[in-house]
Image (cartoon, grey):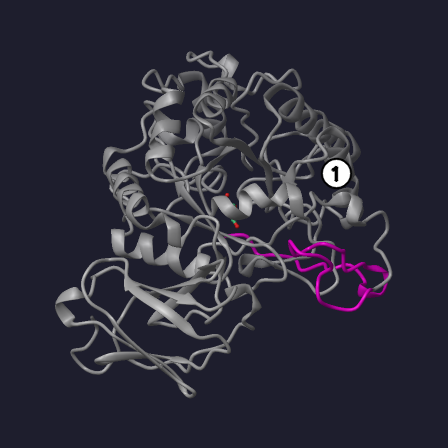
Amino acid sequence: MPSYRHRVCVIAGLWVLAHLSPGGPAAGAQAPASPGAGPDLQAGAANLQWWREARFGLFIHWGPVSLKGTEIGWSRGAQVPTEEYDELYRQFNPTRFDADEWVRIAQDAGMKYLVITSKHHDGFCIWDTKFTDYNIMHTPFGRDVLKELAAACKERGIAFCTYHSICDWYHPDYPLGSPGGKTPKPHPNMDRYNQYLKNQVAELIRNYGPLGILWFDGEWEKPWTQERGIDLYRHIRSLQPSIIVNNRVGVGRAGMEGSTAAGAFAGDYDTPEQRIGKFQKDRPWETNMTICRQWAWKPDDQMKSLTECIQTLVRVVGGDGNFLLNVGPMPDGRIEPRQVDRLREMGAWLRQYGETIYGTRGGPIKTTAQIATTYRNNAIFVHILAWPGDAITLPALPKRVVDSSLLTGGKVSVRQTKDGIEIRVPPDDRQEIDTIVKLEMDGPAVDIEPVALAAVSPAPGKAR
Ligand code: FHN
């Protein structure tokens, strides 16, 4: 994985931008603005609202490399010789690709937005771009995948979004090449590459937009700078003011942890990768994670269990984040049936318990190994993911529990004292994946200051 260069710009010239949180200025002192960065570079709370309520999206990493079953971008010049990798597109013919089927799979999974790699680090473009012939129209398949997906998303009411890599180990003008950005190109021209990048971003927005999100990546390498990042943010905002852009365009992202260096320009949200982000309500965030181990298609890759998928979703939303779950479609254009089954199982769970996920905020009790909480209006949803003993004891809250119910079925007893709230559910009514208790409070849960629960390790034999 990339070794990140944390070239966070000089804090003295940076700006903590207003309205990072939905409700208004972010916490934290006002620092001098970074060159060219300001609130006008952000989507704003109103444009983020649909995304924060959506909570769950499908990530797709796909390209001719699926013919090899190795990792997109990273295997170029590593497991797959560069010359061979760059010729794969000439045999790429995913005849079983069906855009409407992919979007239906996302919809059936309970996902509300779809982010697909328009171009990954390997430089291959899966749309009819006028700026390079290294694209899907020059393959035996010859169809514009982005055009078909954008139409299918529009038809089914799923937000269409694209992932676009800033680094490009194929393009002759980008200074670094494969493997993994470790080799120099012979005659690079970064300014010309930068224009190519901006031209293609404009194509994506103008021809396939309006896009829900432009999900950037590959900003960590030396040729990219904060100034180029600010310029790219400004370019995007000028093309579609409402678009949401992540924090991987400036150079302030803290590696896989995905947060943004204090004071650095943050884009619209943080991007913890392959992990559950920390509890954070003052800046939007989204965990991006693979359903298997590899981002792109890999035969017989290890796939996450339903318990892990659901509990990750619950823990992420409990931390006030979104969950972007990735599949790598096969070279014939299908999403692997066992992955489709997993996504369908998640959708079945969300059809039953989605009220505890969609349109909720994280907290007010912070996630632990045993529980996560989400809330909406006066309701707090306590997701019990493991049982340390016969009861779960929550910290004292400043509002009164006026009613309670066990959304997952069965009986629950709730006892509130000045010291805390004790929850008991008979073992037979406890769910393997998530036992959900709804607490109806005597006022809005948003007024409750987030509170940590002392972690309790499960008593022996009491894991459930
Ligand atoms: O190198 C990429 C990787 O292939 C994948 O696209 C992930 C998704 O967040 N981002 C980079 C690794 O951090």
Residue 231 as seen in the image, left or right of residue 312: right
Residue in view at x 30 percent, y 56 percent: 308
The vertical placement of 383 against 116, above or below, is below
Mark 1 = which residue?
232
User: Front-most of 158 and 360?
Assistant: 360
List x then y, in percent, for residue 25. Answer: 74, 59
Residue in view at x 59 percent, y 54 percent: 284
Residue in view at x 22 percent, y 83 percent: 459
Name the image quarter holding residue 412: bottom left
- Does residue 275 show up? no
Q: Amino acid at mark 1?
A: Leu
> Is 112 in the magenta?
no
Furthest residue to the bottom? 419
The vertical placement of 310 against 187, above or below, is below
Q: Secondary structure at mark 1?
A: helix
User: What's the magenta bit mostly, secondary-structure-wise?
Assistant: loop
Span shown in magenta: 1-30
Residue 33 as seen in the image, left or right of residue 324: right
Residue 372 as seen in the image, left or right of residue 227: left
User: Front-most of 169 and 319?
Assistant: 319
List x then y, in percent, for residue 435. Answer: 26, 63
- Does residue 171 show up? yes
